[in-house]
Amino acid sequence: MTGLRAPSRWLPAAGLAGIAALAAAAPAQDKRPMTIVELVEVPRIGSPRLSPDGTELLYTRTDADWEANGRTTHIRRIRSDGTGDLRLTSGESGESSPRWSPDGAWIAFLARRGDGASNQIHRLRTSGGEASPLTQHETPVQSFAYSPNGGFVYFVAADPETAEEKKRDERGDDVFAFDENYRQRHLFRVGTDGDGPRPAERITEGDYSVVGFRLADDGTRIAHSRAPTPLFDNRDEGEVWIMDADGGNALQLTRNTVSERGAQLSPDGTRVLFLSESNAAFETYYNSNVFVVPAAGGAHRLLWEDMPHEVHGARWAPDGSIYFIANTGVRTQLFHAAGPDAAPRPLTAGDHSLVGWNFHARTGQHVFGISKRESRGDVHLLDADGGNPVKVTSVFDYLGETFDLPVQEAIRWKGEDGVEVEGLLYYPLGHEEGRRSPLVVQTHGGPAASDRFAFDYWANYTQILTARGYLVFKPNYRGSTGYGDPFLRDMVGHYFRQAHLDVMAGVDHLIEIGIADGERMAKMGWSAGGHMTNKIITHTDRFRAASSGAGAVNWISMYGQSDVRTYRTPWFGGTPWQEDAPIDVYWGNSPLRDIYRVTTPTIVLVGENDVRVPPSQSVELYRALRSNGVDTHLYIAPREGHGWRELRHALFKVNVEIDWFERHVRGVPYDWETAPGDGDPDRTAVTDGEDP
């Protein structure tokens, strides 16, 4: 399969339909556009879990707190019919990862309670009362799960410092070895009888880290992954293992140079299922797919080699069938396969993304959020055989009731080489047929990802841009997932071969069909979307403004600076420091090589503590642009990593980008929004004249 279209048996009904015609109806008079603050304040919900009897549901809700300049997460409980929505927790630092005990008598969760406390497992009775800690581990608990009989809670935590290491820290004798100052992560368990915290029993020990685990349905064995370190870049050296619940009889099941995740035993205990971004030969850089391997050891098997989609998560059902969530391009859907040898069939359809999916084996129900144009992910229930998902929560009803939101539409066009490409359009509010609108092109991160139908995240703020009259275009360029392995692997060996040409071919298509104004265009993106922005401004001068967020500009220096090299090696055919290194490939795909061509006014944004695409890349870009006389500014957010979390940083990002676009693309002034309770500072110095 070399193009976008896949065999129809793999596509849900919605994927077979043609592109729907745009309904340009006037917005209801009682609805209004969102403000930036309102968009930043949209809650998040997640971690939905059904009670053992299926009558109730736990979920988390995260809300913005402008006084704290951040977000706080609490746990809520609701009946499966959508009634009785109640907040259960109210800790100052919040709570996460709610889990029912198998008998339904307890709810366990992670929380920090008290000054200087680390994340520990707490639990409270479902009948009421105060929460109490179950663990008092020396290091923070990172993930946990009940044993099937409820007698133990298993958890992963880092090894503690030795007494000597603690003394050295107290003395300030704290020089560390870079990339060697980690603590291995291991599996522990704690009994659940009695009240209050108790000592944990170590299950694994050694010079490796446990990366994900799952107990068998009968609780006797544990499928898990082990990696040589907890560092992100060592994931491809991890392997799938099986062991007894007490850590004995450990057996390694895979031996390869690719990463695996989600290992779990089949209900009959004979096979282990796992996901890997590889092909049948365990070669890297493919769409994530489902594999099985005998639990006693033996050859692995890729289940659906010709499936073009990207699997996000998979679960065994009690009857040995398999459910999984897959990215089909601009949508995600739930699939079911009657067995490892059966072809999957879709259980859901529609213009949406499914988030937080969990399969409830006892009742056969699926619980997940549905993110779409007017909802960020209200929780739904779905029976095992499919049908119409039943909405449980109503957290996001206010979005569609209050705000005028942009129409979203899937669109397809031909790339320069004739391969079909797909993307999303967000129409200006009140769009009229035949009107050309200024265009903002947004490219997604990854690049092994795709833009999908959903309620858009604040960092893309399509709701704000469309309210100001912009058409927003999100192309799933070559290198995106969900369209088959050849489409994804177009980047292998070069990175920028068809990807940037796909973007520009999509732009030209929008101009040709008469909806985009080719004289008024802006380009933006974050991470791989920033890489693409950096490439585009060296490729063409057609954009009047650009914003590069945490983007790479020099692949040679980036290789050594970033905390991950796993994906970059296949892109460029080796490392930049090996004998006969492919330096020409690295440099040939580096936007810095052609930076002298840039005339597009470009702002640059990055987090001060970003280890994925370090600030040094943004500094190289900024200094090159400034040296060449290009209108530019570099904005660095203190304390932030690869994704910005603080609310005022979020507000700044949206404000500064809109200001930049309005000034350079439309030639109009822009009044910055302020945070609740803040004044209205003069922002002139930020975008005009000297750098702030």
Image (cartoon, rainbow, N blue to C red):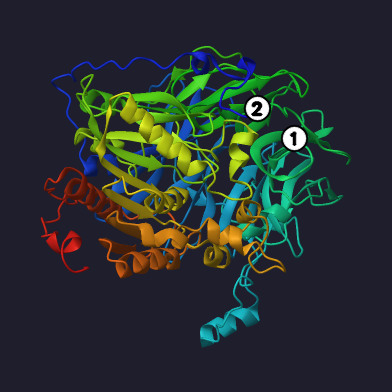
Q: Could you tell which of marks 2 and 1 lies nearer the N-terminus?
A: 2
Q: Amino acid at mark 2?
A: Met
> Who's the residue at 23% across and 28% down the image?
436
- Disc 1 marks a residue whose amino acid type is Phe
Helix, strand or loop under label 2: loop
Q: Image quadrant of residue 86? A: top left
The residue depicted at 45 percent of the width and 26 percent of the height is 413
Q: Which residue is mark 1?
A: 291
Q: Position of residue 173 (x, y in %)?
A: 55, 87
Q: Percent from the top left, x then y, of residue 458? A: 32, 43
Instruction: Say if residue 608 shows up in the picture.
Output: no
In the rendered image, the quadrant that contains the C terminus is: bottom left
From the viewer's side, name the closer residue of 82 and 430.
430
Label 2 neighbourhood size at 10 Å, few (<14), some (14-19), many (20+)? some
Of the pair 397 and 435, the residue shown nearer to us: 435
Q: Is residue 31 above or below residue 683?
A: above
Residue drawn where x is 68% and y is 34% of the image: 289
Q: Are marks 2 and 1 in contact (CB under 8 Å)?
A: no
The answer to which of 390 and 98 lies nearer the viewer is: 390
Side (left or right) of 135 relative to 550: right
Residue to which mark 2 is pinned: 1
